[in-house]
Structure formats: structure tokens, C-alpha cells
């Protein structure tokens, strides 16, 4: 009938690492409970850590789309209108287009369908002929700095160079798929980064010499006054020399319409799962901790500890778990986003693995709010315990 002998006492490994003389008794109790249940502590931290990347993944799509739009539609394609011709025309057409009302700038381009070969690999794409003085379409390198198209070689987008397994300085075979179907070996002068498509570039005079067609253009990029866009588009439709007209505003609007719904649905689903994980992990851990320590906590209340002091002992461990979980989750998010972005990229577009600071703040804030909400529910049970029933319980 004698009570069980007390367990042997020794300092926990956490106490050995910290200057416990400067830590009050309540915090020492928190540290001892963490050290006494390392597996549960680790699993709780891991659960919270995995909730953060899910929340980041739901919000990051906005950052990726903003980056794609900024690079492709503001840096690379700086004009707001593009027209194509039914067949290559003399370069004089550029001067004719510049005289139209509302047209502020015009630059001619030569677009030739080609097959690029590198060893056993090949890819069917288009070569875009640009002038070194062009401003309305400017390829950019990985640091988003504009580069000039070399007159002595061919410039590839980075994804296209990866597809062919080549890099700057390598030699590839360029075979034109129209006209005389000329074929030539050219060095890769540079690799550029673009989010949409896998194209290649050559200096327009070099490209025209390659095709043997003289000074011709097959498309023109223009910058038109916004107030004149509608009237000019109607005029282009009546011109036999214009095959198609593309307005950047319409292209961008169509791009956003196609993916906006998908992005919002994806963000909502992932955010919901992140909240469920955070609430489930913290709430269950807190409930288990409360049930395991009900007798000790009730005893502290009887001894004169306030509700806040008792809750601080229980939730001090969870505060550390939440802080560690969110910190680890934020670091893990960049790795997860890099893998997801690479998995979803295809020949049509490349998703940049870009995460803005506001996305980290939103993800951390949502997970923290979910964890605090679940802790608040348990706190109500801590504040109103059945002291008599708890003190009658013996383990």
C-alpha cells in the first residue's frame, strides 16, 4: 500500500546546454518536458514545418506569374503591338508603318522556322532576326541584363540549350525550313532567359544572308499610343500586307484569364491543407500534453499558481515548437518551390522559382494564426479545470 518510489533525477541534456541559473523554475519545467519527450517534440516541429511550404506553395504562384509578366512583357517584349506579313517584305515596309498615325516606334524582324541539331538531338523552332539597335525586343541574360545579338553566331534561350544539351561556344547545325532550306553550322554566342517559349535569335542581316533573301522582314514590333490602338487595329485588318495583328494587352489578358482561376483554386486548396495540418498538429499535441499533465497542472493551481502561469508552463513548449517549425518550414519552402517549379515547367513556359518576402510573411502568419487558434481552444480547458477530479487522479 506504500506509494511508488520516486523516479531517479538527473539533469536533462537541454539543461546541460543552457545556463539554468539564469532561468526561472517555470522555464526549467518547460525544458525538462521537451527533453523528456524528444520524439513527440520532433514530430510536432516537423508537422508545423511541413505546413509552411504548403502555404507558401499556394501563395507563390502570384509571385511567379508577376515575375513571368515582368520579364517577358516588360523587359523582353517592350512594344505593345506586333504585326506579321503573309510573306517576307522589303525592309521599306518598316518606314511605311512608322508613318501611320499614333505609331511612335517600329522595328522590323525576320522570323524563320528552323530545325536545330546538336549531335543526335534536334528541335523545331524559329529564329528571330533582330538588329543590334533594336529596343522593342531585347533578350536578357540570367541577371536580367539586356544583351545584343551577336552577328557571328546564334543565341538560344537557356531552356532550348538545355534541351539540345549545348552551351555557349558549342557548334550546332541550323537548317531553314522554308525557301531554299539552307543549312549551316553556327556557334552559340550566348544563352538568354525567357519565361515563355523556346526561341533562338540571330542578327537580322546575318539571318537574311543565311536565307539568301536580301534585306527583308516578316514581322514588325511597334509601340503605339494607347489611344490609337483600337483605330490602328481596325486599319490593319483592311490592309492586304498585314496577315495578323497581336496586341500585348489582349495577349496578357488572355494569359491571365487562363491561369487566374487555376491559381486561385490551387492557392485556396493548399492554404486549407496548411491550416488543417497546423491546427491538427498543435491542437492534438496540446490536448495530449494537457491530459498527461492534468494532475501536475491542477496541483500548481492548488499551490497558488495563477491561470497565466500554469498556461505558460503548458504552452511554453508549444511556443518553442511553433517557432522552430515555422523557421524550418520557411527554409524548406525554397527547396520545395524549386522542385515544383521545375516539375511544372514545359516547352510553352518556364515557372520561375521566385518567392517574395510578403509570401513568407503570409505563410508564416497563417500557420501561426492557425496554431494560436488551436492553442486558444486548449487554453480554455486549462483555465477551467476540475481541480477535485484532477487531484483524485493518480498515475
Image (cartoon, grey):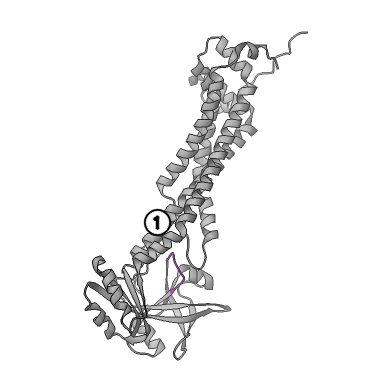
Q: Nearer the viewer, residue 21 or 291?
A: 291
Q: Main secondary structure of the magenta part?
A: loop
Locate the C terminus by quadrant. Answer: top right
**In the image, residue 30 above or below residue 116:** above
Residue that label 1 marks:
66
* Frontmost residue, 309 versus 384: 384
Q: Residue at x 51, y 43 (%)?
A: 52
Q: Is residue 384 left or right of residue 98?
A: right
Residue 310: give x, y in percent of width and height: 53, 18
Quadrant housing residue 147: bottom left
| Mark 1, secondary structure of its residue | helix
Residue sticking out furthest to the top: 1
User: Picture coordinates of residue 274 (x, y %)?
Assistant: 54, 42
Q: How many marks?
A: 1
Q: Residue at x 60, y 32 (%)?
A: 41
Depth check: 117 or 363 in front?
363
Q: Position of residue 82 (x, y in %)?
A: 34, 73
Left/right of residue 394 with respect to residue 123 in the rendered view: right
Badge 1, how many Cα within 10 Å: few under 14, some, many 20+? Answer: few
Q: Quadrant of residue 235?
A: bottom left
Residues drawn in magenta: 194-199
Q: In the rendered view of the protein, which quadrant contains the N terminus?
A: top right
In the picture, measured across the screen, residue 81 lies left or right of residue 336, that is left
Which residue appears at 59% of the width and 35% of the height? 281
User: Where is residue 211 shown, x and y percent of the image?
Assistant: 41, 88
Q: Is residue 290 magenta?
A: no
Give the image quarter of residue 67.
bottom left
Relative to 370, say whether 194 is above or below. Answer: below
- The answer to whether residue 326 is visible is yes
| Nearer to me, 19 or 186 | 186
Q: Is residue 332 visible?
A: no
Amino acid at each position: 500500500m506504500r506509494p511508488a518510489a520516486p523516479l531517479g533525477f538527473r539533469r536533462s541534456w537541454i539543461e546541460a546546454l543552457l545556463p539554468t541559473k539564469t532561468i526561472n523554475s517555470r522555464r526549467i519545467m518547460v525544458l525538462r518536458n521537451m527533453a523528456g519527450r524528444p520524439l513527440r517534440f520532433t514530430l510536432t516541429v516537423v508537422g508545423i514545418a511541413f505546413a509552411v511550404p504548403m502555404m507558401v506553395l499556394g501563395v507563390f504562384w502570384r509571385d511567379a506569374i508577376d515575375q513571368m509578366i515582368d520579364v517577358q512583357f516588360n523587359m523582353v517584349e517592350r512594344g505593345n503591338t506586333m504585326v506579321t506579313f503573309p510573306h517576307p517584305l522589303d525592309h521599306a515596309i518598316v518606314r511605311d508603318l512608322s508613318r501611320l498615325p499614333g505609331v511612335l516606334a517600329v522595328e522590323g524582324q525576320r522570323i524563320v522556322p528552323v530545325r536545330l541539331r546538336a549531335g543526335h538531338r534536334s528541335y523545331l523552332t524559329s529564329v528571330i532576326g533582330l538588329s543590334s539597335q533594336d529596343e522593342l525586343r531585347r533578350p536578357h541574360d540570367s541577371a536580367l541584363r539586356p544583351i545584343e545579338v551577336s552577328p557571328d553566331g546564334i543565341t538560344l534561350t537557356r531552356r532550348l540549350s538545355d534541351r539540345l544539351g549545348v552551351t555557349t561556344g558549342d557548334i550546332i547545325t541550323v537548317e531553314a525550313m522554308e525557301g531554299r532550306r539552307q543549312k549551316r553550322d553556327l556557334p552559340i554566342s550566348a544563352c538568354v532567359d525567357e519565361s515563355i517559349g523556346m526561341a533562338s535569335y540571330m542578327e537580322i542581316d546575318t539571318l537574311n544572308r543565311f536565307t539568301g533573301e536580301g534585306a527583308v522582314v516578316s514581322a514588325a514590333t511597334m509601340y503605339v499610343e494607347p489611344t490609337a490602338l483600337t483605330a490602328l487595329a481596325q486599319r490593319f485588318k483592311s490592309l492586304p500586307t498585314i496577315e495578323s495583328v497581336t496586341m500585348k494587352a489582349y495577349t496578357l489578358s488572355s494569359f491571365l484569364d487562363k491561369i487566374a482561376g487555376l491559381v486561385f483554386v490551387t492557392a485556396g486548396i493548399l492554404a486549407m491543407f496548411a491550416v488543417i495540418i497546423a491546427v491538427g498538429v498543435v491542437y492534438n499535441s496540446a490536448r495530449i500534453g494537457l491530459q498527461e499533465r492534468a494532475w501536475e497542472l491542477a496541483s500548481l493551481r492548488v499551490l497558488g499558481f495563477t491561470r497565466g502561469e500554469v498556461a505558460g508552463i503548458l504552452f511554453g513548449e508549444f511556443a518553442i515548437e511553433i517557432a522552430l517549425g515555422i523557421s524550418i518550414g520557411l527554409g524548406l519552402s525554397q527547396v520545395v518551390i524549386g522542385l515544383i517549379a521545375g516539375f511544372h515547367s514545359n516547352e510553352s513556359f518556364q515557372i520561375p522559382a521566385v518567392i517574395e518576402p510578403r509570401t513568407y510573411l503570409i505563410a508564416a502568419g497563417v500557420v501561426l494564426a492557425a496554431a494560436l487558434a488551436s492553442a486558444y481552444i486548449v487554453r480554455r480547458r486549462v483555465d477551467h479545470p476540475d481541480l477535485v477530479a484532477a487531484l483524485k487522479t493518480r498515475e
